[in-house]
């Protein structure tokens, strides 16, 4: 049995699982965007599908956070974390908008070298923003549960 002051192992497993999946998707996308070859129609279609899948996954992840759960529990345990939680939640619309912009950039048309370069820069910026968001989220959960989630910074 675990202490009620510690994070529930089911919650911890859920958090870690979602973050591993996000990082896996980011790594796959990064491989596509760092490929120096201009994508052909088939590869571009695959990149679009991967981006759309990432967006759907993030939307669901964010909705779960916003409905309550471990972030809300962190506030209940340490009310002073309320502003940090609100800041983390405030990132959600902007991160989804970055993906929407990226999807528009690589739209349903052939892609020029300039457009691909713009998309590559856009993905790099999005990836950086998401990783900062995840670090901030992890910090709130770790502090709220006084638990080291053993996540790399």
Image (cartoon, rainbow, N blue to C red):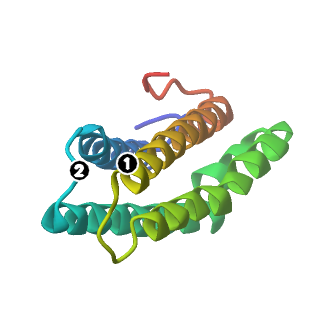
Label 1, secondary structure: give it.
Answer: helix
* Residue depicted at 33% across the width and 67% down the height: 53
Between marks 1 and 2, how big is the CA–CA gap? 25 Å
Q: State which mark lies toward you, 1 or 2.
A: 2
Where is residue 45? Give x, y as percent: 22, 69
For the residue pair 109 and 49, the one nearer the viewer reads as 109
Q: Is residue 85 shown left or right of residue 145? A: right
Residue in the picture at 68% in, 52% down = 91
| Residue 67 in picture, x, y percent from top left | 63, 68
Compared to residue 104, the image places residue 112 above or below, namely above
Residue 37 is labelled as none
Residue 55 can be seen in this image: yes
User: Pointer 1 and pointer 2: residues touching (CB < 8 Å)?
Assistant: no
Query: Foreground residue, 2 or 10?
Result: 10
- Side of 76 relative to 23 (left or right): right
Q: Is residue 141 above or below residue 48?
A: above
Q: In the rendered image, which quarter is residue 64 located in?
A: bottom right
The answer to whether residue 64 is seen in the rendering is no
Q: Residue at x 43, y 22 (%)?
A: 152
Q: Residue furthest bottom?
A: 108
Q: Residue at x 46, y 40 (%)?
A: 124
In the picture, the quarter occupied by the N terminus is top left
Image location (x, y in percent) of residue 79: 83, 43
The residue tagged 2 is 38
Secondary structure beneath dot 2 equals loop
Q: Residues within 10 Å of mark 1 (few under 14, many from 20)?
A: some
Q: How many marks?
A: 2
Tell me if mark 2 has few (under 14), some (14-19) or many (20+) residues whose alpha carbon lies within 10 angstroms of its own.
Answer: some
The residue that mark 1 highlights is 22
Looking at the image, is mark 1 or mark 2 earlier in the sequence?
1
Residue 148: image x %, image y %?
51, 23
Picture quadrant of residue 144: top right
């Amino acid at each position: 049995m675990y202490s009620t002051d510690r994070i529930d192992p089911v919650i911890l497993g859920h958090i870690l699982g979602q973050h591993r999946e996000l990082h896996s998707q980011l790594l796959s996308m990064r491989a596509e965007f760092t490929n120096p070859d201009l994508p052909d129609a088939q590869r571009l279609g695959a990149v679009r599908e991967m981006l759309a899948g990432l967006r759907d996954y993030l939307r669901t992840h964010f909705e779960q956070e916003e409905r309550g759960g471990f972030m809300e529990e962190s506030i209940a345990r340490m009310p002073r974390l309320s502003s940090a939680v609100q800041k983390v939640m405030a990132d959600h619309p902007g991160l989804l908008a970055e993906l929407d912009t990226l999807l528009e950039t690589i739209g349903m048309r052939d892609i020029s070298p300039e457009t691909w370069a713009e998309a590559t820069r856009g993905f790099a910026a999005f990836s950086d923003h998401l990783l900062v968001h995840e670090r901030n989220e992890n910090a709130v959960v770790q502090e709220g549960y006084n638990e080291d989630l053993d996540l790399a910074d």
